[in-house]
Image (cartoon, rainbow, N blue to C red):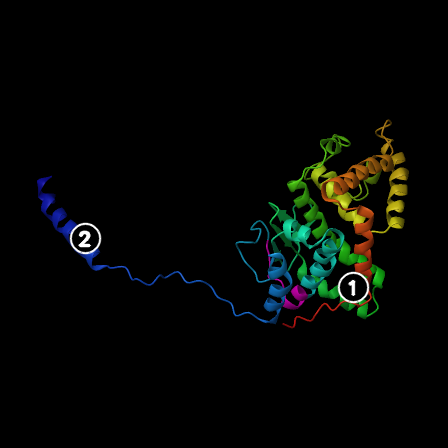
Amino acid sequence: MKKYILPLLILAAFGVASCQQDLLSEESVIKDSSVEMNDFDYWLEANFLKPYNIEFKYRFSLDESDKGFWNTPADIDASIIYAHLVKYLCVDTYDEIAGIDFTRAYFPKMFFLVGTWEYRNNGSIVLGTAEAGKKIMLSGVNELPELFDDLEAGRITEEQLAEDLSHYYIKTIHHEFTHILNQTKSYPENFGTITSTTYVGDACFDTDNYWRGRGYITAYAQSEHREDFAELVSEYITHDAAWWDAQMKAAHDETTEVRKTSPDAEFGDVIIDSKISIVNSYMEDSWGINMDDLRDILLRRFRDVAAGRVDLNTVER
């Protein structure tokens, strides 16, 4: 074993000498990424960042993306339309109903746009997600301009445009914002006990399985009580009273089918009515927001957009 000592000592000395010669540069190899601001960036700064401290991110970021899905960047033209819609139909709506201080304090501090829809294994689509009350991810952005193209070509009416905008885009924001409000101030625990035995978790939601007859305003509301609560808020404020009454009638009628397997089932409209009563009280008592007033404001703004009274494309400084 002794014959290896000298070569090892020589090698060690050579290594020390080499290390002493490899001096680190004083200039870091890590560079801050910089993007030249365009007119849209300046518009976002003036309409979101400065007045509300909200970052509106439309450029793709892997760190902000949900890596469980295949995502594509949002097109800038579609992002401009979406930014205007978020401002007019969401931010400005809460300014009008509750004041700018409320919006500044509780609205999420980041929106992140994704070009395509996010498809889950159970067949459902992730329209948006909220994270810790600070960020809302919105998907399917690149499909948005087609709705306005369809309106201009006469393929859909203004009423259908408003409904599609609500269902695929704006309702999602109000739904996710409800989660944020719930994370800040909890709603009464008895809400989750009303239909505690019929939530289905992360299952495939069959749209023909009489979910209204079991006391849910949408199929997705069946997943859990948090989603049930947020669906009630977002569906109520994005539809008029006639639509709501039609849902209650359908819920009552569908209970007949539900009772074929659950003979003692309570009427679905009665269940939904008990839930929306808790929702209304929570919004009024916790946030000073009357749901009917909020609905009136939002529907008026939807009509403005559908009628072309709102500029959705200009981003001048």
Dividing the picture into quadrants, the one containing residue 229 is top right
Tell me which amino acid carries mark 1.
Answer: Val
Q: Is residue 108 left or right of residue 291?
A: left
Whole-number angstrom distance, CA of label 2 to CA of label 1: 71 Å
Which numbered mark, 2 or 1, is in the foreground of this view? 1
| Residue toward you, 233 or 199 | 233
What residue is pinned by disc 2? 15
Residue 100 visible: yes
| Residue toward you, 70 or 32 | 32
**Span highlighted in magenta in the image:** 70-80
Q: Is residue 106 left or right of residue 167?
A: left
| Residue toward you, 150 or 260 | 150
Above-or-below relation of 192 to 39 = above
What residue is pinned by disc 1? 305
Q: Is residue 117 left or right of residue 246?
A: left
Return the disc, 2 or 1, that comes first in the chain's sequence: 2
Q: Residue 75 at what x, y percent from top left?
A: 63, 66
